[in-house]
Amino acid sequence: MPAGQQRTITAEDLYEFRTISNVRISPDGEHVIYAEQRVDRKTEKKFTNLWVASTDGSEARQFTFGDQVDKLPRWSPDGAQIAFLSNRENPEKPARLYLIPFSGGEARPLTEIQGNLNDFTWSPDGKQIACSVIKLDAEEIERQQDEQKKKLGVVARHYTRLFYKYDGVGYLPRERTHLWLVDVASGEARQLTDHPVFDEISPAWSPDGKTIACVSNRSDDPDQHPDREEICLVNANTGELNVLELPIGPKSLPSFSPDGKWVAFFMKPGEGDWYKNTHLWLAAVDGSVPARDLLEGLDLHVEAATINDIGAAEQMPPTWSVDGERIYFQVVLHGSTLLMAVEVSSGDLTTILPEGGVVVDFSLDRKQETLAYTYGRMDDPCQIFARDLHTGQTNQLTSLNSFLKEIDLGEIEEVWFNGLEGNSLQGWILKPPNFDPGRQYPSIMEIHGGPLTQYGNFFMHEFYYLAAGGYVVYFSNPRGGRGYGEEHAGAIWGGWGGADYADLMAWADYLATKPYIDPQRMGVTGGSYGGYMTVWIIGHTDRFKAAVTQRCVSNFISMWGSSDRNWVFQQIMGDEAPFQNLEKFWKHSPIAYIGSAKTPTLVIHSENDMRCPIEQGEQVFVALKRLGVDTEFVRFPEEFHGLSRGGRTDRRIVRLSHIRGWFDRYLQ
């Protein structure tokens, strides 16, 4: 459609987006299965069904139907069946494990476990499925079976563990996560591991089906030492568990080599140093040689996440080649998520899918002739592709969200600029639709959360919506984030509000020199850590004429112990509690400088935010009110920290309307 005939994006377009997840290629390489989510505007519910696409590029087709959530599809080793989780029988109960023949037919429940299934994987012979399960507490089971108790609800919660809640989930059960085995033929389920303190997650089968690798923290009190995770090997018959001798550090996603002699996994060495790079490691199953870092000496960070607000990237486990000579994995770099491969023997690195977008997920067929992957770009949230690894021929398998062709999103310019200390920084400038270089525009600086993540080459509906209101929207990756090496990530370790603030001010300075920017009409917003920086900014400068702080951190002292990560946040402050170094916690708290604020500031927070509790936003709102600074407070009931990405759609729309309305009031 010609640009002059295109419309601009709206907040209500959030109802139109279809998102996909868990794309997996069939063993024979001819099809991919995936989950596709849609929003029902009338009920505000989100439903997910399974879809199938042929890797030859022919039209995708819906595979399961109904107003339910079908998710996590997994092919059986022979490709004849698909296992998946579904809440189709009762949306109020945990999802059950189902099987459906790929050739057609009804899905059947495989088993009923009174608990939440988090992950599962087929055994190599297709006869069993290993699951990680959190059983329901006895009180919860009793409440579900008694209508009167169910009506009255929870009477009290009693905890002895340190971590007792988690954002996006709520208050945790007292039961831990353990491994279960399900017999595919009979549906019989048996618990394989059990312990009142330890969890076992991320199960992965050995090629001979005799062993299951998993991740488990086996320290005396895992909540006191959250980074002491181990790779454990569990006997699939007896449940006997052996811990591999590995360096200390958080570990994830173990994967056996084709010959069963090695386990690959991701690890960040040490304790408490979040900023360090996560690398790909290799350990001998028999412990005969020390574990080694396959990316040793490389300043790369293994991760999938690049920020967006339509769908999300999935961290895939290390994926071995058939001959065991190379391993595939994702890396974040310069605003992109790449797919790379490393040669196990030499350490030589190959980029399979380069910079320019985000590899959301990927999988290989049995012969590893075809690579299926989901790819997102700035102008397209995600599409599925299949690539012949021999010829390089690539087929696009989906055409989701075609309504975007009717929309003028504006133009994005990528720039590199220097920070105040001469450091090189990357940013992007989004110009509004029908941009006129002869005009001066109001602008909005967006600051990402984390901070250990990155903005980049991924679709952000929020940015396009603000640009559609006549704003130049600009965003960057200041020091403290990912994608630019360990030194860049660690520059603010020990206390936020230093190098990051300097970089953001340099970014604002850079934009202010552009002839199309009105330096008197500049706004700033951000969420989570970005909310922290927004409050920090209004306490340190009045150069911005309006601000919106979202789900912010404002007071490190009161946040200690009240966040779902409770005491762990002290690690960014030198690993001392506030009662050990109150001065430092206060020095790095934006609320300490709020008395200097003059910028009209909108405060947005979710009432069920367990990561940055709502009292953080309340302090900012009350302080600004008492100071006589223009401010308003928008609270969203029932929502967790991730409202802007996964909240109820009508609330996401209202949130966007408040943000743009606030900037319109002061900048237009």
Image (tube, rainbow, N blue to C red):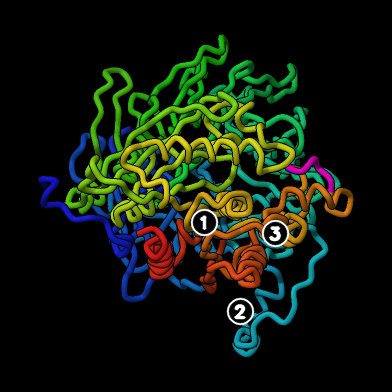
SS class of the residue under badge 3? Answer: loop
Which three-letter amino acid code belongs to the residue tagged 3? Ser
Q: Report whether 519 appears left or right of 251.
A: left
Dot placed on the residue nearer the N-terminal end, 3 or 1? 1
Q: What segment is highlighted magenta in the picture?
A: 572-576
Q: Position of residue 229 (x, y in %)?
A: 73, 39
SS class of the residue under badge 1? Answer: loop
Q: Which of the two discs, 2 and 1, sits closer to the camera?
A: 2
Q: Report whether 576 appears left or right of 150.
A: right
The residue wearing badge 1 is 186
Residue at 31% across / 59% down in the picture? 64
Q: Distance between the residues labelled 2 and 1?
A: 26 Å
Q: Distance between the residues labelled 3 and 2?
A: 29 Å
Residue at 84% across / 45% down in the picture? 576
Magenta stretch: dominant SS?
loop
SS class of the residue under badge 2? Answer: helix
Which three-letter amino acid code belongs to the residue tagged 1? Ser
Place residue 196 in its image quadrant: bottom right
Task: Judge the density around disc 1: few (<14), some (14-19), many (≥20) Cα neighbours within 10 Å.
Answer: few
Quadrant in which the C terminus appears = bottom left
Q: Distance between the residues labelled 3 and 1?
A: 43 Å
Q: Are marks 3 and 1 in contact (CB under 8 Å)?
A: no
Task: Judge the density around disc 2: few (<14), some (14-19), many (≥20) Cα neighbours within 10 Å.
Answer: some
Q: Nearer the viewer, residue 160 or 300?
A: 300
The residue wearing badge 3 is 563
Residue at 60% across / 26% down in the picture? 421
Q: Which of the two discs, 3 and 2, sits closer to the camera?
A: 3
612 is higher (above) or lower (below) than 255: below
